[in-house]
Amino acid sequence: MDIPINLWMWILAALPIIVLLILMAGRQWGANKAAPLGLLIATITAIFFYRADLSLIGYEVLKGFWSSFAVLLVVWPAILLYEVVSEAKAFVVFRNGLKKVTPNELIQVIAIGWIFTSFLQGITGFGVPVAVGAPLLLGLGVKPIYAVVIPLLGHAWANTFGTLAVAWDALVLQTGIDSNPELLLQSALWAGIFLWIFNLMTGLAISYLYGGKAGVKKGLFAVVILSTIHGGGQLILTQINTTLAAFIPGAIALIVVFALSKTKRYGEKWRLENSNVMNRDVTSTATDEFPENMSVHQAFFPYYVLTAITLIILLVAPINRFLGQLQIGFSFPESQTGYGFVNAAQEIFSPISPFTHAGIFLIVASLIGFIFYKKHGWVNQESGRKILKRSGQKTLPSAIAVIGFIVMSRIMGGTGQTLVLAEGIAGTLNLAYVVFAPLVGLLGSFMTSSNMASNILFGDFQITTANILSIDSAPILGAQTAGGSIGNTLSPGNIILGTTTAGIIGKEGIILKKILPIATTAAIIIGIILLFAIIIF
């Protein structure tokens, strides 16, 4: 590869991302408006400055469309499930019931926005925790913007070892560290340490968003207990079974959070009237009407179905193997830029296994939930038509943004722009680079909407950089995937899922602006800890 690594080429590669950040976080543009412009800039840069021919661009565009389909296969079903539950007025029932079970409002927000979304990330991923968590928080009375921000923060720590460790496995396969058992365990250990730090920061951040210092003070005990289960449990399991390292702690914390609500500290009714997160202007109106014969468990029934289906199909090995046999994907030939940057031929690119895909789980849960609600008279045939119409209307703007972002990331990755960004940073900073190693992982997730893709994109780069700097690669790899997890809070695909199910499409820039300082601060803190660890050890 002969791409010149200089300031000019670095600026060109960074330009699409800079423009997106300015438009979305600075000018409050919606993702469906900003994404096409970012795509246009990346394409022009690829052709005129990175020497990509039209055939290479065409292949990367097709790859992007296929990857977008995998995301949209979650978007529409997630909206569908939300519309089914909303049509039955079940969110109102759930909200009222949760307030009785957990009278502390902060614990209610933590239970849904952090603990339940973490549980979902442990088994499903692919944006489902955000898509499901946002409307549930709306049902609790959380403002729409924060109903998206909170689950974005809450689920991300579990992204590396969640979804049965698919992102971690991608890093292992990409770097080949499975051939060195000691390096493999050390890398997993460091990843667990960094993710525990991020998990604790997440709990504190949600408490702070809810009520500032008073929120942190009230929630501190619960946050420490729950983070010890989440982060500590995952850390231990990284040395035993990475596949279940996020799922098991997530399931245990789901039980413990409700046990905490029965303690003296959290068992009494408590809320902050001036909380910025809660919508205090909403009073009892016609929209708060609900079926009085619907119990909380009946209201939550579709989510029970979703959890059961996911657990059975993903955790029962014979069923998973049988249903996972069918894989759909496309082959692509090798392509190469004028600078010699090569995209290897792929026999089957990013295959989708439809019967083990989160989108199918959501569709089945939606269908069974609708039948269940209809049997009890809470929805009818006309409701079904309304649900399908609203779901389709909400999906279209999301589709434009998702396709734009993912195709842009494919073109940048396939023409060497992404690699130039990372190598330019490493070459300039030398040893100080380790502080920014998590930011590289974060950048990868932001660009691709996937920690798995970030690990594939930058895994080899991180280990090569560590060797050049003569430092231990295990903590660097741990920081890479931890940064990738943090980057999922900024993932355009996840943000769009949240704004869609929360009914605030076009507000992606506001959400990005709120999360960006938290995510970058978390990544830099982990980077500083990494630097001290390397110097000391």
Image (cartoon, rainbow, N blue to C red):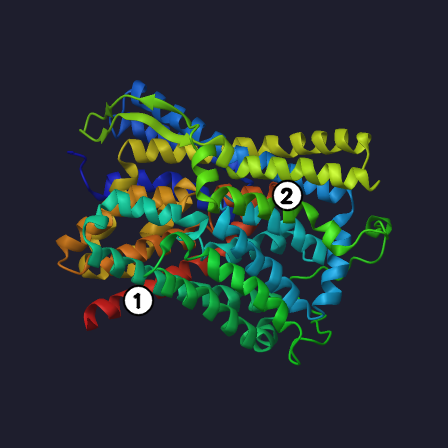
Q: Is residue 525 left or right of residue 153?
A: left
Which labelled disc corresponds to residue 501?
2
Q: Residue drawn at (31%, 68%), measured in percent from left and top?
A: 529
Q: Nearer the viewer, mark 1 or mark 2?
A: 2
Real-space CA distance between mark 1 and mark 2, rounded to the nearest whole angstrom: 36 Å
Depth order, front residue of 262/525: 262
Q: Mark 1 falls on what kind of element?
A: helix
Q: Residue drawn at (82%, 58%), measured in percent from left and top?
A: 283
Task: State the image coordinates of residue 23 (x, y, percent, origin top left).
Answer: 49, 43
Query: In this orientation, does residue 514 appear?
Result: no
Task: State the image coordinates of residue 208 (x, y, percent, origin top left).
Answer: 56, 69
Task: State the image coordinates of residue 407 (x, y, percent, origin top left).
Answer: 41, 31
Q: Residue farthest to the front?
A: 318
Q: Of marks 1 and 2, which one's residue comes earlier in the chain?
A: 2
Task: State the image coordinates of residue 290 (x, y, percent, origin top left).
Answer: 83, 50
Query: In this orientation, does residue 202 appear?
Result: yes
Q: Give the answer, above or below, for where 531 lies relative to 441.
A: below
Q: Amino acid at mark 1?
A: Ile
Q: Mark 2 falls on what kind of element?
A: helix
Q: Residue farthest to the bottom?
A: 264
Q: Give the answer, above or below, for where 160 lies relative to 528.
A: above
Which labelled disc corresponds to residue 176?
none
Which labelled disc corresponds to residue 528?
1
Other residues around mark 2 within 10 Å, as few (<14) / some (14–19) / many (≥20)? many
Q: Is residue 58 left or right of residue 65?
A: left
Tell me the quadrant of the picture where the C terminus can be found.
bottom left
Report which quarter residue 415 is drawn in.
Answer: top left
